[in-house]
Image: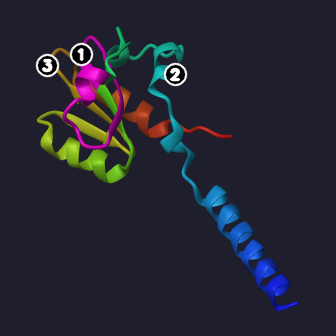
Amino acid sequence: MIAASLAGVALLIFIVVAVVTLVSRDTRQDINLADLTHSGTEIVALEGMREDTTRLCADKSGCVQAYSADHAEILKFSTRADAHGFAESAPDAYQSNWIVVSFTDDSLTSSERREVQNYLDSLATSH
């Protein structure tokens, strides 16, 4: 009887933790950078995007996915803290949650840079 009660309580706790995790999980961490390559947007900073995870993530803590573009590099990290650490160390970077865009040259105007920053900030995903 006591074992059954304890098992019931353990099951209830597991269900509550699972529901809270699912409800409170920020789905933006599930964004796949590959989806940006065929999003249909005309953002100059994303032109020429190609997968480059092996090279770009090689020495970056928490880097899990990366793409090169004509004038920027877009990296995704496993945590916001890792993304922040990289963004702080990069000379010309912008962090949007788990994603960091690093501008690789001066050819983009400030408007074109804001455009990709706003786009990244507005990305959402749902299950």
User: Observer-nearest residue: 113 or 84?
Assistant: 84
Check contact, mark 3 vs mark 2: CB within 8 A.
Answer: no
Structural distance between the alpha carbons of marks 2 and 1: 18 Å
User: Observer-nearest residue: 108 or 98?
Assistant: 98
| Eye-nearest disc, 3 or 2 | 2
Q: Which residue is mark 1?
A: 71
* Residue drawn 36% across the image and 27% down it: 116
* Residue drawn 32% across the image and 27% down it: 74
In the depicted structure, whether residue 9 falls above or below residue 38: below
- Tag shown at residue 106: 3
Span shown in magenta:
54-73
Structural distance between the alpha carbons of marks 1 and 3: 8 Å
Q: Amino acid at mark 2?
A: Asp
User: If the image is split into quadrants, where does the C terminus sit?
Assistant: top right
| Eye-nearest disc, 1 or 3 | 1
User: If the image is split into quadrants, where does the N terminus sit?
Assistant: bottom right
| Eye-nearest disc, 2 or 1 | 2
- Mark 2 and mark 1 lie on one chain; the one further toward the N terminus is 2
In the rendered image, residue 104, in percent from the top left (x then y), is placed at 17, 21
- Label 1: element kind: loop
